[in-house]
Amino acid sequence: MDRGLASAIGWLFGPQQGDPDRFIPRRLFLRALGAIYFSAFFSLAFQIRGLIGPEGILPAGRYLQAVGQSLGSWQRIWYAPTLLWFSSGPLMLRALCSAGMLASVLLVLNLWPRGMLVICFVGFLSFVSAAQDFSGYQSDGMLLEAGFIAFFFAPPGFRPGLGRLYPAPRASLFLLQWEWFRIYFESGVVKLLSGDPEWRNFTAMDEYYQNGPLPTWIGWYVQHLRHWFHAGTVYATLALELGLVWMLFLPRRWRIVCFFIVTPWQIGVILTANYTFLNYLVLAMGVLLLDDRFLLSVIPERWRVRLRTGISEKSPKPELASGKSRGRDWRVLKLSASALILTWIFYATTAELIWMFAKVPLPTSPVEALEPFRIANRYGLFAVMTRERYEIEFQGSRDGQTWVAYPFRYKPQKLDEPPRIYAPYQPRFDWNLWFASLGSWREYPIVPNTEVLLLSNDKDVLALFAGNPFSQQPPHQIRAVRWQYWFTTIAEKRATGRWWRRQLVGLYAPTLELEPDGKIKAVEWPKE
């Protein structure tokens, strides 16, 4: 290999020649990533059996069995890369969440960060690959992409500290910043390409806080601000996503300025909407806009001395115990593998970005090969704004006349209960019902599947609700109705204390009845 090319590859992908000014941001980012992974696994621990367990709404075992019947042994693993091929029973699901939570805590504590990143990535990918409708979120792809690249970004070793012997490889740092940039920029692009008139007319934010999946009480107050404020946030959103994020590629001072613009913005989004761990992840990646020099100038003196010592202290390079040639060959192999994988991700993500503007004839197979692993994604948030808020409610009855609602844990339901802040916790069942409310029950099998399971008082599915109004005996009939919700006005809230008002739209899915012989039949169908 040409010496100049080898030197360039080592400079881009080699840890010994990595960025010497990102030790503190790297440590902060990896801690935050561990906390985000923990939130993802922690929320799954309480839901996963009801979502994809053997008696869940969309059993992973049945899905994987169908995949296995249509694909060969190796094809099926590539199409659905998940540990649940070994088992999808309750014990395996519990082990998946427990291992993920433990590994994420150890990542926060900086114990063997690369090993913990592998466990977190494999565990979360195992869920995402088998969860079907419960994992089709852009936030899942964001976390998997960031988590995978972070393996190359993190220092090696069991207790690496700041990893002063192994600066962050420049390519891995760039790819994390590249993901941060694409989340913003591609979201701005899709807003323009979608043709949604609300973005062109600066009305996209007028009812945004009310119509999102899980609003917050702070969003209620922001909703009632004047139109000029909402029009201003539309302009600011487009300006930030399409313009300001380009400051990433400007000199150091501009990147720091960019950090102090996007950070308050993300905090504002977190307070006014529950987008699970999405905004926390974007917030964490924003830390990589900073460097050691800036952070050492703003942190307390007692930390500054210790960190400056840890960064500047020089230790001898580890010597090979034996076999210098063999050790050199191993380093070359690792460097080549890193260069290949990171270049592959950059190509796939860049191609996805280019194809948003034009169908340039670039090779598609490298992009398609990575799709099952969700490590090279296209993003695009809020391309089209939701104009109404609907909520699906499950109701049970013993006589077909008196209907009692199943209480939700997180979705708006009680009119006098303020919408709370749950993020980064992700209630996937409640979240998916919001998407289902905007479409037909035929497109969202989770609704009729839930009805069937409620007829038998399935304990795993009931755990997704806040309570069971039929704890003594299962209901005779189950139905799903759809309501339209609105925030109350300020005057209405003062007079009634209610945060919401609602109106019944009608039956959403077929009403199901359990017959004496154990068969289930539909007794009423929604009007199409």
Image: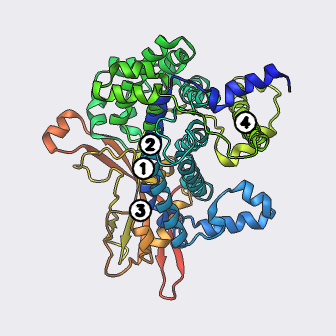
Q: Which residue is mark 1?
A: 39
- Report the side of 505 relative to 199 (left or right): left
Tell me which numbered mark, 4 or 1, is placed earlier along the sequence: 1
- Report the side of 322 relative to 415 (left or right): right
Whether residue 350 is visible, yes or no, is yes
SS class, disc 2: loop
What is the spatial separation of the Cα atoms under label 1 and label 3, in whole angstroms?
A: 12 Å
Q: Which residue is mark 4?
A: 335
Q: Is label 3 in contact with label 4 (beta carbons under 8 Å)? A: no
- Between circles 1 and 3, the one closer to the viewer is 1
SS class, disc 3: loop
Residue at x 44% of width, y 42% of height: 277
Residue at x 27% of width, y 44% of height: 500
Residue furthest to the right: 1
- Between circles 2 and 1, the one closer to the viewer is 1
Tell me which numbered mark, 2 or 1, is placed earlier along the sequence: 1
* Type of amino acid at the residue the image marks with label 3: Phe
